[in-house]
Image (spheres, rainbow, N blue to C red):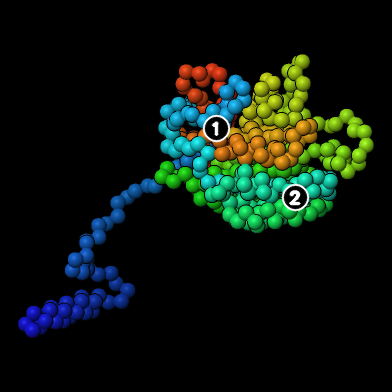
Amino acid sequence: MNTIRQQRCRRALWLLFTALASASTLPGQAPTGPLPPRPGAPVQQPPKNQIKVQVALVTTPVTVRDSRGVMVHDLEANNFQVTDNGIAQKISHFDLGGDPLSLVILVETSSRIEPLMPEMRKTGILFTQTVMGPTGEAGVVGFNDSVDKLQDFTSHADTIESTIANLRPGTSGSKLYDAMAVGVEMLSSRPQATRENPGRRRVLMILSEAVDEGSEKTLGEVLRQAELANVTIYGVGLSTTRAELHAKPKAPERPNLPVGALPPPPGVPDTPTLEDNRYAGVDLLSAAIWAVEHIHDQVKGNSLEVAAAATGGASLSTFKDRSIEKAIDEIGGELHSQYTLSYTPTDADATGYHEIKVSVTRGNAKNLKIRARPGYYLAPPEG
């Protein structure tokens, strides 16, 4: 009983002390000294003057193939060297095809490719099973003269497959760059990579002709945003010539194939795919760098190839013996077999174009073909 009385007395004294301390301070006035801490509560220290700097994490996909074109899967982080503007960087995150994907499927729905719609409507299961994988999510955007978000991000395979299966043709226009900007904006909302957490790999897959009509955005603007948001762009090039052949079973005329972003060397035939152009000696990466360095970009040639080259992806034509399904399957296989390297650039405040170079340091490196994003552009702060 004495113990209980003592506890009650202490409690009453504490309440009285708190009331007196509060009454000694008039409303609107700051107390003349610090209030005594409650029993057992730590004393709060004054904040220190600190400047927090937000440093971006740069992520690049790296595809490595041997001399036969087979993807190489046995490399470790210490086999890679990454430089940013010539300065060696420390790799903070390394992965081989395991990081979860956030995918935006960008589909041209113009009337020009209406004959290809039946084939395109069958590709939903490829996106969910081959590209997204068990941990992925996807959204769908259609575009013609308008840009329409057909499905927001979802991890439900049935929803994505149903959206693709119900694609409908629209008008004859093709606002490709505006649609790309919407896709990049959607992907920018997904969990951002940090030094502690890789976040989600951000992939924009475009099923479209390499033609833009009427967009307010330019390709250079879109590519700058895609690079800053660590978005990798893949293209599945649709062909109006192929669409016409599907619609009209007649003797085909000479196809009007899309040309490369740069003219081929003498004696080298021009080809409509990124891989063929690169290994034929046409350096599309220089065209991609040019595109992101110039805001008034009037890029001539195949914009899908330039976009893919600028972000470390690939562009596949579907005109010859490669069907739309086969192209999607190839891209899905690459996404789950490529390396992902992340680093915090040592000169993250330097504006202008940052050139990224990735090399392999092990003994047989000279026989390997490496594809990675060539760089990114940091604009100076406004004002």
- Dividing the picture into quadrants, the one containing residue 78 is top left
Tag 1: residue type? Val
Left or right: 111 with respect to 20? Answer: right
Task: Pinpoint residue 165: horizontal percent, then vertical percent.
Answer: 73, 53
Residue in front for this viewpoint, 271 or 298: 271
Q: Earlier in the sequence, mark 2 or mark 1?
A: 1
The residue that mark 2 highlights is 121
Give the residue at x 50% y 36%. Answer: 96
**Residue contact between numbered discs 2 and 1, judged by CB atoms under 8 Å:** no
Q: Residues within 10 Å of mark 1 (few under 14, many from 20)?
A: many
- Residue at horizontal 81 percent and vertical 53 percent from the top: 170
What residue does disc 1 label? Answer: 62
Query: How many discs appear?
Result: 2
Q: Residue furthest left?
A: 2
Compared to residue 287, the image places residue 141 above or below, namely below
Name the residue type under label 2. Arg
Which mark is nearer the camera, 2 or 1?
A: 2
Residue 142 screen position, x and y as percent: 72, 51
Quadrant of res 221: top right
Residue at image position (28%, 69%) is 30
Q: Quadrant of the N terminus?
A: bottom left
Identify the residue at horizontal 66%, vertical 25% (top origin). 278
Which label is found at residue 149?
none
- Report whether 243 appears left or right of 358: right
Q: Position of residue 265 (x, y in %)?
A: 73, 18
